[in-house]
Image (cartoon, rainbow, N blue to C red):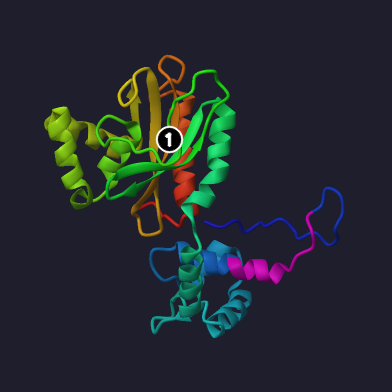
């Protein structure tokens, strides 16, 4: 639902004031955004209610937006996104880079908790880190960009194990399970918990004495794009579900996913 009582646009630039803008452009975007966020086409009446505009004023905007191809009007007189809006969205998605977008989140993770922050992506030989920002603590983790992690004994790997399509990980999982004598029944229970809670933790698993919290990052196709991971020392990095570290990581994972175009079901 959009706010009908929008703040007035500043009429002049100055200290403490927003730069002057074009209110009609912002109002037009509000209409397109309302249509975009709806799961079904919207009628004139529905749009009037959501955007806080009279039908007569809204109609003039709709004529222009349809003329530009940003919206389209169906035979049932309902409005949905037009071809040009879809093309713009696709072009924008092609320019999205999880490595670049993750930088601000990694900085905030590192600064807020003074723990090592990392971003991992998938390769056919397993998850590996493409970004790694060390904390300023005296204890160094000993992992760096390019390091790979296991699927079943690391928080990062468990996120990939839980959310990647099974056919993508099956071969690697089978090899690792046999070598490490993994209890597959317990593993499946753990993976289901990770899917339900949206995060994975380990304490002293992949590296003795090291704890980690990892959360999934999804792209615009609802596919796993990466994992954000916070790494620290056992007993120093709290991994309980109610810890601020876990809750903040979940928030960051959702926010970065949204930046990548992911729309939660």
The foreground one among 29 and 228 is: 228
The foreground one among 211 and 64 is: 211
Residue drawn at point x = 54 percent, y = 18 percent: 138
Tell me if residue 46 can be seen: no
Residue drawn at point x = 51 percent, y = 72 percent: 88
- Rendering coords of residue 248 (x, y %): 49, 33
Is residue 28 highlighted in magenta? yes
Q: Secondary structure at mark 1?
A: strand
76 shown above or below 16:
below
Q: How many marks?
A: 1
- Rendering coords of residue 50 (x, y %): 53, 62
Residue drawn at point x = 50 percent, y = 78 percent: 84
Circle 1 residues within 10 Å: few <14, some 14–19, many ≥20: many
Where is mark 1, residue-wise?
229
165 shown above or below 77:
above
Tell me if residue 8 can be seen: yes
Is residue 23 highlighted in magenta? yes
Specify whether 186 is left or right of 250: left
56 shown above or below 253:
below
Task: Please identify the quarter of the rendering in which residue 62 is found.
Answer: bottom right
Residue at the far top in the pictured view: 235
The foreground one among 98 and 32 is: 98
- Rendering coords of residue 57 (x, y %): 63, 75
- Rendering coords of residue 146 (x, y %): 41, 42
131 shown above or below 238:
below
Task: Please identify the quarter of the rendering in which residue 235 is found.
Answer: top left
Specify whether 249 is left or right of 191: right
* Magenta stretch in the rendered image: 18-29
Residue drawn at point x = 47 percent, y = 52 percent: 98
């Amino acid at each position: 639902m959009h706010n009908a009582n929008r703040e007035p646009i500043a009429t002049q630039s100055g200290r403490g004031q927003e730069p002057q803008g074009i209110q009609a452009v912002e109002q037009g975007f509000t209409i397109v955004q309302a249509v975009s966020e709806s799961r079904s086409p919207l009628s004139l009446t529905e749009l009037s209610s959501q955007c806080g505009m009279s039908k007569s004023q809204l109609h003039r905007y709709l004529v222009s937006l349809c003329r530009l191809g940003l919206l389209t009007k169906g035979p049932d007189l309902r409005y949905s996104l037009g071809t040009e809006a879809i093309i713009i969205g696709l072009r924008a998605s092609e320019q999205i880079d999880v490595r670049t977008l993750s930088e601000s989140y990694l900085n905030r993770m590192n600064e807020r908790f003074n723990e090592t922050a990392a971003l991992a992506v998938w390769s056919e030989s397993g998850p590996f880190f493409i970004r790694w920002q060390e904390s300023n603590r005296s204890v160094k983790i000993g992992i760096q960009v390019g390091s790979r992690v296991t699927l079943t004994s690391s928080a990062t790997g468990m996120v990939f194990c839980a959310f990647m399509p099974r056919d993508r990980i099956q071969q690697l999982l089978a090899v690792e399970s046999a070598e490490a004598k993994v209890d597959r029944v317990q593993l499946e229970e753990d993976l289901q918990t990770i899917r339900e809670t949206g995060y994975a933790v380990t304490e002293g698993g992949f590296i003795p004495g090291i704890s980690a919290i990892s959360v999934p990052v999804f792209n615009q196709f609802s596919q796993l794009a990466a994992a954000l991971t916070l790494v620290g020392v056992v007993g120093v990095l709290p991994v309980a579900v109610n810890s601020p570290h876990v809750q903040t990581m979940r928030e960051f994972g959702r926010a970065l996913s949204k930046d990548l175009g992911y729309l939660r079901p």
